[in-house]
Image: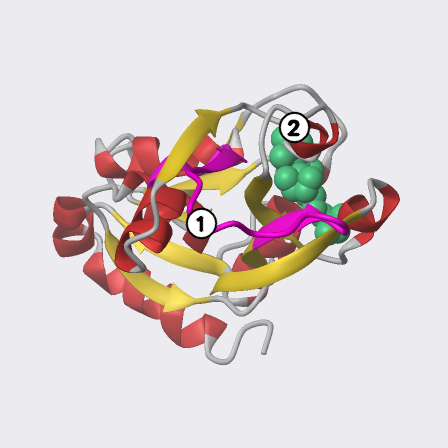
Amino acid sequence: MSGNSLMNVALPKGRLGEKVYSLFAEAGFECPAILENSRKLIFENTDAGVRYFWVKPSDVAIYVARGAADIGVAGKDILLEYRPEVYELMDLGIGKCRMAVAAPKDFRENPERTLRVATKFSRIARDYYGSMGRDIDIIHLNGSIEIAPILGLSDVIVDIVETGTTLKENNLEVRETIVPISARLIANKSGFKFKRAAIERLMAGLGGAGK
Ligand code: PRP
């Protein structure tokens, strides 16, 4: 079986990806080599007709949109922020968290003033405040967003909240929930046509995955 006839799967590197792999393995797409502790990034099992590769979670949708992967698993946050040209096939019910606005406990909103928002998710923030007609100034950061309001760089942040620990330890609190987030199975549009049988077999095997 050549690489082209295998179902190519982009997995998000990390804890979520390992969980996703075990769901896929239970659904009939095993590739035991992936569990070996190595620095290898590509693993295939020709008997099961599958090839997996580990990529940065925020890059999964790029591989899938461009057809380097037929399918992959990406957070709803990435799909909302980058709007990749992919099919969103299924909510896997794992990697659950929410996109929220958070602020220092003593911050009081003043509707007369432009709100300074620090975030990695500029489009989500712009869409959210735009829908309310609220003027904002976006400060795009790449990580450690929680520091911005503490240092006076921003008034609030728009970021992912899972357990709430990061906010709590930095004296911030959730003010509004923008949208719930979870991991989604995504597919390349033509890959979905050509590998449909395998993808449907996987989806049937996933059934009520993670629910
Ligand atoms: C995310 C998010 C928060 C944290 C929330 O960061 O940006 O910092 O997780 O989780 P909690 O509510 O359970 O504390 P991530 O670890 O993805 O890294 P980042 O700093 O690159 O955003």
- Is residue 64 visible to us here? yes
As for residue 78 lying within the magenta part, the answer is no
As for residue 106 lying within the magenta part, the answer is yes
Q: Secondary structure at mark 2?
A: helix
Q: Position of residue 186 (x, y in %)?
A: 33, 53
Which numbered dot is residue 127? none
Q: Give the magenta part as a residue range.
A: 101-123
Seen at 66% across and 58% down, the residue is 174
Q: Nearer the viewer, residue 22 or 66?
A: 66
Total numbered circles: 2
In the shown orientation, is residue 56 left or right of residue 168? left
In the shown orientation, is residue 83 left or right of residue 150? left
Q: Secondary structure at mark 1?
A: helix
Which numbered dot is residue 148? 2
- Quarter of the image for the N terminus: give it: top left
Q: Position of residue 87 (x, y in %)?
A: 23, 55
Q: Is mark 1 within 8 Å of ligand 1?
A: no
Give the image quarter of residue 154. Answer: top right
Q: Position of residue 90 (x, y in %)?
A: 37, 67
Q: Which residue is mark 1?
A: 77
Q: Position of residue 162 (x, y in %)?
A: 69, 56
Q: Nearer the viewer, residue 28 or 68?
A: 68
Q: Residues within 10 Å of mark 1 (few under 14, many from 20)?
A: many
Seen at 48% across and 71% down, the residue is 206
Q: Nearer the viewer, residue 67 or 149?
A: 149
